[in-house]
Amino acid sequence: MSDLDSPSPADALDGASTVEVRTSASAALIPTIRAVASDLAARADFDLDAISDLRMAVDEACATLVDVAAPTSWLRCTFLVRPERIEVHAQVQTKHSEAVVSTDTFGWRVLQTLADDVTVHHDPGVDGAGPTVGIRLDKRSGDVMR
Amino acid sequence: MGELGQACPEFLDTALTRPYPETVVLAVRGEIDTLTAPAFTAATEELLTASGEVLVMDLTDVRFLASSGLAVLITAAHRAEDRGIRLRLVITNRAVRRPLEITGTAALFDLHSDPESAYGGRD
């Protein structure tokens, strides 16, 4: 298949623009990931409060995951920029398959307040792939009637 | 350490001053997140244990507040209340104001938009 015919790898099938950031699973690199979140939200014309919320939510998700990440492993954060909302998928390899993200914490409640939707997914890993934990969150670009 | 241009990411710029005999001010500059939260906690402890009737946290130059920082603020508000003091915050940007508003915790503090109004005498 010619590269000119196939969809650009940066675009998901539904037209979302995709940005993926991968770093060492270290808290020192989270500021960079939240800077990416701010930048994408600003370019997508999010209102100022929504930009602030997304940045804080991404920070919270990444900090939560880095906390259970295996030493020397990676943190991956994928942003899907859709019309009027951004979908974020953050993931780390965990120390062991029993590593669990608690949703009974102050930080998680803040995350639920900041994002329009947030879920956590634990994957024990199969066929040699190590265990991972992911957090997915969605944020709309501005206030809508709720 | 230093590959991102910052010598020490755990560092948070803080300064404790006493502009009036009974007024103690903790000024914080930078980003309050997982890395800098311990430094923020330590600086807050100094403010909360200082003698005085007016306790102020000047967050004018704080460019980001993570949930860990918000938790420190909330705990500080309660500890100040234990001394019969309502903690005053100087807030000038959205990065600090928005988390307080959206979590409904702004009411725990006496909010000011400029330092001078915060330094004033007892309510």
Image: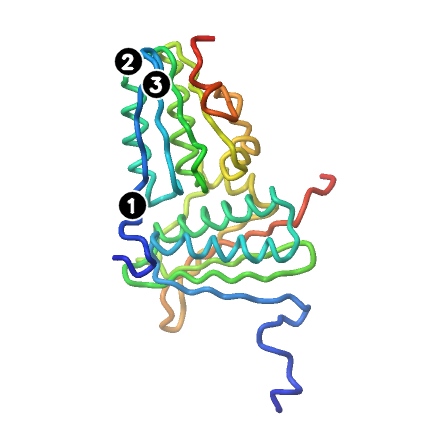
Mark found first going from the N terminus, 3 or 1: 1
Q: In which quarter of the image is the N terminus of chain A?
A: bottom right
For image coordinates 69% across by 54% down, the residue present is A84
Q: Quadrant of the C terminus of chain A?
A: top right
Location of mark 1 (residue): B10
Q: Position of residue B24 (x, y in %)?
A: 34, 19
For image coordinates 45% across by 42% down, the residue present is B63
Under mark 2, the amino acid is Ser
Under mark 3, the amino acid is Pro
Quadrant location of residue B103? top right
Report the side of B3 relative to B121 (left or right).
left
Q: Is the same chain shared between marks 3 and 1? A: yes
Task: Name the chain under label 2.
Answer: B
Q: Of helix, strand and loop, which one carries label 1? A: loop
Q: Where is residue B1 in the image (x, y as percent from the top left)?
A: 25, 57
Q: Distance between the residues labelled 3 and 2?
A: 13 Å
- Residue lying at the far right of the rendered structure: A145
The label shown at residue B19 is: 3
Mark found first going from the N terminus, 3 or 2: 3
Q: Residues within 10 Å of mark 3 (few under 14, many from 20)?
A: few
Q: Where is residue B17 in the image (x, y as percent from the top left)?
A: 31, 23
Vertical placement of B92 versus A84: above or below?
Answer: above
Quadrant location of residue A3? bottom right
Question: Dots 3 and 1: beta carbons under 8 Å?
Answer: no
| Residue A98 visible to the viewer | no
Quadrant location of residue B22? top left
Under mark 1, the amino acid is Glu
| Residue B29 visible to the viewer | yes
Location of mark 2 (residue): B51
Q: Of helix, strand and loop, which one carries label 3? A: strand
Q: How crowded is mark 2: few (under 14 residues within 10 Å), some or many (20 or more)?
A: some
Report the side of A89 relative to A50 (left or right).
left
